[in-house]
Image: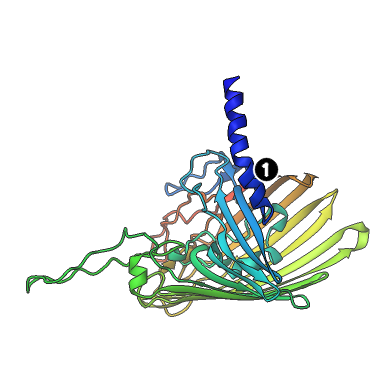
Amino acid sequence: MNKKLVALAVAGAFALPLAAQAQTANVTLYGRLNLDFEFVRGQQADGSNPTVNRVSSNTSRFGMRGTESLGGGLNAIFQIESNVSGDTGNAASSSLASRETFVGLQGSWGKFTMGKFLMPQDDLHGIFGNAPTLLTSILSTAALWAQGPQSKGGGGFDARTGNNLRYDTPNMSGFTAALQYSTRDSSGDQQNFVSCTAPFPPSTTCPTPSVGNGGDNGDHPSELRHAWVAGGNVIYANGPLQVGGSFEKNHVVRGPGLDDRDWTVTGAYDFGTIMGGFGLRLALVYENTKYETPTGDLKRDFWGASATVPVGGGKIYLFYGRAGNGKGGAADGTTVGGLVKGPETASKQWEVSYSYSLSPRTLLYGGYVRLNNDCNAKYSFNINAYTINTTHNVSSPDGTPCNGEPQGLIGGIVHFF
């Protein structure tokens, strides 16, 4: 009985201020739990290729968002979104505001936000990618595209960066555009800071700060060399047609004097019901990537195609993508992420999946994915990576085990709330 009285007292204390806030702001709690059971394999360094079963959480989340009307069509907006490790419950990545988190203003002129969120290039992923399975899990079609598994510090172009300023235009007859800038400042991360306070004895040299790359956010060495990330997109969506283009540049993010850039074009068309009563949506994507390295440029081309077919109340999704050999002036064996310069460094991604909605809030899915890495390629899954052999290189002796070809069969369930 005492516990009930305490609960009533607490509820009463908060009821009045919460009611007052509700009159001026619209706040929503939301989230999703996305768990799957996987059978995965991929050759190990010793040449073995055992099948492993595991349960994985796929970008599960919990968040709060809100809007306050400021008058004259202007609104204040905010969102705080956190990763949820539904498989283990205690991952280090499950901290507060670990996903899309921002504050900003929105009106007829568009939207301005500051905070932590994905770069504009990610907005193109849904045009060609595995949208029926929510662009996540080992089925994610960003395993090769945009070097999705890599952080900004590792050369990725599909990262959730910190310290952002972003502007999104309003929809103009189907056209939208976005521009984003990430400062790469330390924001309290001083782990790579090296103090240097004069005077020093004549024989002493002031230590040089470590290179640092700050992952997806930033660090003090990045501040000192004025590193930044910038990107943008233009998308047209009208009826059955979607097309988009994006660019992204990482300025001295991986190290002094090393600039990276990437651009993508994609398009999709939904043909609606065709022969046999089935629907069909086809999409294409092309990407060009260039990294600067100490020995020269490292370049790569990627292209892919997908088809979505509504069947039996659900959707079949098919995808094929190919990342070409690493090329350019860099020395053979030069590596950024999964990309390696030289022969036999290409990779192909094959995927088939089926998703079925039990209700507007509950989704079932299953699928198979495989990355056919050439002997010297080092690509792995985008979400929930699986360790494979990556020791083979262009100079490896004959008989050395080639790098692994990760593949997986999965079945999962998602609940939205």
Q: How many marks?
A: 1
Residue shown at 75% from the left, 78% from the top:
172
> Which residue is outermost to the top?
1
Query: Which is nearer the eye, 61 or 268?
Result: 61
> Looking at the picture, how far across and down is residue 265, in whole percent?
65, 75
State whether residue 86 is above or below residue 67.
above
Answer few, some or many: residues within 10 Å of disc 1's Cα (few below 14, many 20 plus, some between 14 and 19): many
Residue 299 at least partly seen: no
Query: Which is nearer the eye, 393 or 67?
Result: 67
State whether residue 407 is above or below residue 175.
above
Query: Which is nearer the eye, 409 or 164?
Result: 164
Q: Quadrant of residue 184?
A: bottom left
Rendered image coloring scheme:
rainbow
> Looking at the picture, how far across and down is residue 253, in whole percent?
41, 71
Please name the residue that numbered disc 1 is placed on.
412
> Looking at the picture, how far across and down is residue 400, in whole percent?
41, 55
Circle 1: residue type = Gly
Residue shown at 68% from the left, 76% from the top:
109
Residue shown at 48% from the left, 60% from the top:
378
Residue 127 at least partly seen: yes
Quadrant holding the C terminus: top right
Q: Quadrant of residue 189?
A: bottom left
> Which residue is outermost to the right?
276
- Secondary-structure class at tag 1: strand
| Residue 249 shown left or right of residue 62 in the figure | left
Query: Which is nearer the eye, 339 or 119?
Result: 119
State whether residue 162 is above or below residue 357.
below
State whether residue 293 is above or below residue 78.
below
Residue shown at 72% from the left, 46% from the top:
365
Quadrant holding the N terminus: top right
> Looking at the picture, how far across and down is residue 100, in whole percent?
57, 58
